[in-house]
Image (cartoon, grey):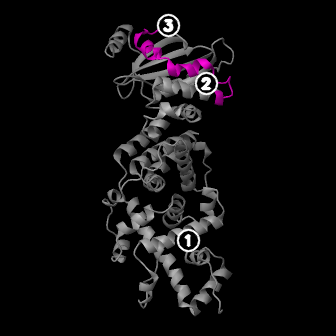
Amino acid sequence: MTTHDFSDETLMAFADGELDDAEMERVEAAMNDDPALAERVALFMEARELAEGVFASQLAQPVPPSLQAAVERMIAAPAAAATVLPFREKGRVPAAANENRRGFARFAMAAAASVAIVAAGLAGYMAGQGSAPAGSAQVALIDVPGLDDALLTTASGDTTEIAGAGTLTAVSTFTDGANRVCREFELASEQAFVGVACRTTDDWQLTFAMGTGSADGTGYQPASSLDTLDAYLTGIDAGAPLSLEDEAAALAAFR
Amino acid sequence: MTDARDEIGRRLIVFLPNMRRFGYTLTRNMDSADDLVQAACEKALANASGFTPGTRFDSWVFRIMRNLWIDQIRKGKSAGQAEDIDTQIDLVGTDGAREAHARMDLGDVSRAIAALPDDQREILLLVCAEDMSYKEVSELLGIPIGTVMSRLARARKKLVEGGGINADARRSQPEEDGHGS
């Protein structure tokens, strides 16, 4: 009873009610004898109370409507976004290419990367899936600006050879829920991808990409990739494909 | 599967204020916090089946947020963007707890909390605001309970120092009001 050699941690645990019954009683008895001990306990309680006040005020702050709406949209959308997400996480996006991107939302929501950047991420995704390791062709896309142009100039149903990157086949053009002009396309070299890119004022953003297997037909992932694409298109509220005429007009506006 | 996702969605919406607060505790920047919250919601929905009903939803969500944040820091993109704490305090509402500590400036305490090392601030929030036990925090963070306790004790000592309380002044007072927690 004379030596009250309690650690800060023990006294704090007492203040928080985290000690077992025997220890609680031991500290309580000691506190009765020793005001200084009671004072140390009181400081831990006081600190907790102060922290609670600050944290409570933070909790009282209204959630920004934009954030709330974004989350509600996610909840309402089919699980498509979920299946798109992994390649962004597994993909090893080169730091240099990544610098101009601001935050998490952009990173995680597959919204703001250029085609070339995401192609690099996609290579990582393919590797992560246990398919063939990222081939040089995909990595090389980073240095091949031709993809952007090809998306502007290739009519749906046509193909364009992109030097060093493979064969682009334009599938369709449509507008998404945000009224952006988007294109579904396939890109085949050593490996094949199906992708969706949407146009901003000055470049294409790849919003969806998925490996469909090797271009020579081996390792093709049946059905699932196209199901995923369909779910994704539903999720972004994709409109019906534009006619070739409308497509040409829409694409011309960006040149 | 869809039911699980819907259920997670409902709970996320309700939990958004707590997520923002935890996000701010991690990032010390409200914009980064909101980005983090959004990314975490997406991830939680994508992995809705990964949540085990009957376990703590808050721990599950916080773990997702932490992992995303740690990832982000490792990529070297978002560390060290703390904003002036005063911009956060503008929106503070008055409440009973605040008046009880009229002699203390809430802003001082906020600054003291913001100045804590990241690993202490996080634990302070989880225990004092989210009412997690030491054990629950230890499991969430993957560190021993002893480490949780030592960090939390250090944080609280700094807080009463930085918050304007000192033991000598208090000793001169005959009695302190009850400490509800």
Q: Report which quarter residue B160 is drawn in.
A: bottom left
Left or right: A107 in relation to A246? right
A124 is higher (above) or lower (below) than B117: above
Mark 1 residue element: helix
Q: Which residues are magenta?
A: A127-156
Q: Report which residue position mark 1 lands on.
A: B153
Q: Report which residue position mark 2 lands on.
A: A224
Say whether marks 3 and 2 touch (CB < 8 Å): no
Q: Report which residue position mark 3 lands on.
A: A159
Mark 2 or 1: in front is 1
- The image shows residue A24 at horizontal and vertical percentages of 63, 81
Mark 3 residue element: strand
Mark 3 or 1: in front is 1
Residue at horizontal 55 percent and vertical 12 percent from the top: A164
- The image shows residue A194 at horizontal and vertical percentages of 54, 19
* Helix, strand or loop: magenta stretch: helix
Which residue sits furthest front? A96
In the image, residue A144 lies in the stretch drawn in magenta: yes
Mark 2 residue element: helix
Specify whether residue A48 is in view.
Answer: no
